[in-house]
Amino acid sequence: MCRIQLCDVIGGGASERSKCRFLHHRGHKLYISDLGLDRVYVLDLESAHAHTFGSSGRGGGQFSDPAGVAVDRRGWMLVSDAANDRLQVKSEITRLALVIFLKKTTTFPF
C-alpha cells in the first residue's frame, strides 16, 4: 500500500484555491474533481503515480466547476462540468471524446 498526499499533487500556492469535492474509485485508481482549480486528479494507488487534466475555461478538456466524475470498467470518464452546463466524456488513454451540452433550465434535486 502506498501513500499519496493530494497537497503534493496540487503543489505550491494553488492548494489554497483547491476545493476537492467529488471522489470516484475504480480498480486501483481514485478520481477526484477539484471545483476550485477546475481540474481532475487521477491517483494510482498501486504505483503512487498521480496526474491531472483540465484547466479553467469553456473549451474541450476545460472545466468550470467540475462537480463530479464517474468512470466505467473500460476507463471512460464522465465529468460533470457544472458552470459550463455540460458533461464531458473522455478515455483515460485518449483526449476528449464527446461533449454533451445541457439546457440551462435543467434543475437538480438539491
Image (spheres, helix red, strand yellow):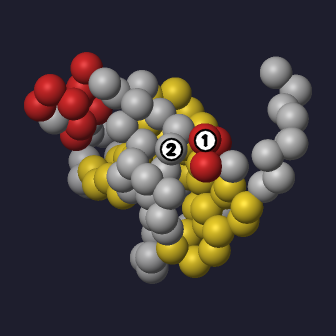
Q: Position of residue 68 (x, y in %)?
A: 61, 41
User: Which residue is nearer to you in this view: 21 or 56?
Assistant: 56
Q: Residue furthest left?
A: 12
| Residue at image coords 36%, 57% | 53
Q: Is residue 97 above or below residue 22?
A: below
Are there few (<14), some (14-19), or many (20+) residues within 10 Å of tag 1? some
Q: Position of residue 59 (x, y in %)?
A: 48, 64
Image-quadrant location for residue 110: top right
Q: Position of residue 13 (x, y in %)?
A: 14, 26
Q: Earlier in the sequence, mark 1 or mark 2?
A: 2
Structural distance between the alpha carbons of marks 1 and 2: 5 Å
Image-quadrant location for residue 3: top left
Q: Is residue 7 above or below residue 10?
A: above
Q: Is residue 4 above or below residue 49?
A: above
| Residue at image coords 16%, 35% | 11
Left or right position of 83 against 12: right
Q: Which residue is mark 2?
A: 64
Q: Position of residue 70 (x, y in %)?
A: 63, 51
The kind of residue tagged 1 is Ala
Image-quadrant location for residue 22: top right
**Disc 1 element:** helix
User: Which residue is nearer to you in this view: 3 or 96?
Assistant: 96
Left or right position of 3 against 32: left
| Residue at image coords 49%, 68% | 60
Labels 1 & 2 near each other (Cβ < 8 A):
yes
The kind of residue tagged 2 is Ser
Disc on res. 83: 1
| Residue at image coords 30%, 39% | 1
Are there few (<14), some (14-19), or many (20+) residues within 10 Å of tag 2? many
